[in-house]
Image (tube, rainbow, N blue to C red):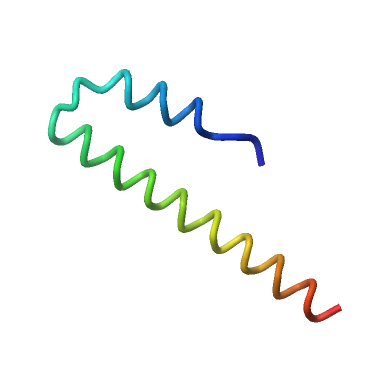
């Protein structure tokens, strides 16, 4: 996976921190972090099984 920091930084910079857009940003960031964590856990489980 590529480093998403630049993407998230650009998106936050583009928001005028309008409440709905800021809330959407935080939600999307949280979801992305949870997905990344799930992928890492799946990889670790796979390696343990081998």
Residue 49's place in the image compared with 34, above or below, is below
Q: Quarter of the image containing the N terminus?
A: top right
Residue 22's place in the image compared with 16, above or below, is below
Q: Quadrant of residue 44?
A: bottom right
Point out residue 10 in the picture as x, y percentages from the top left corner: 41, 21
Left or right of 12 in this view: 3 = right
Residue 30's place in the image compared with 2, above or below, is below
User: Farthest residue toward the bottom?
Assistant: 49
Point out residue 29 in the picture as x, y percentages from the top left corner: 38, 44
Left or right of 13 in this view: 44 = right
Point out residue 23 in the picture as x, y percentages from the top left corner: 21, 41
Q: Quarter of the image containing the C terminus?
A: bottom right
Residue in the image at 66% along x and 68% along y: 42
Q: Quadrant of residue 24?
A: top left
How many numbered tags mark residues here?
Answer: 0
Question: In this orientation, which residue lies closer to the viewer: 28 or 5?
Answer: 5
Residue 19's place in the image compared with 32, above or below, is above
User: Farthest residue toward the left?
Assistant: 19
Residue in the image at 61% along x and 60% along y: 39
Q: Quadrant of residue 16?
A: top left
Point out residue 36 in the picture as x, y percentages from the top left corner: 55, 54
Left or right of 14 in this view: 9 = right
Residue in the image at 32% along x and 20% along y: 13
Left or right of 46 in this view: 14 = left
Residue in the image at 79% along x and 72% along y: 47
């Amino acid at each position: 996976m590529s480093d998403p920091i630049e993407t998230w930084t650009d998106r936050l910079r583009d928001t005028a921190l309008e409440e709905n857009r800021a809330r959407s940003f935080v939600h999307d960031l949280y979801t992305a972090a949870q997905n990344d964590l799930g992928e890492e856990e799946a990889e670790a489980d796979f390696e343990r099984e081998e």
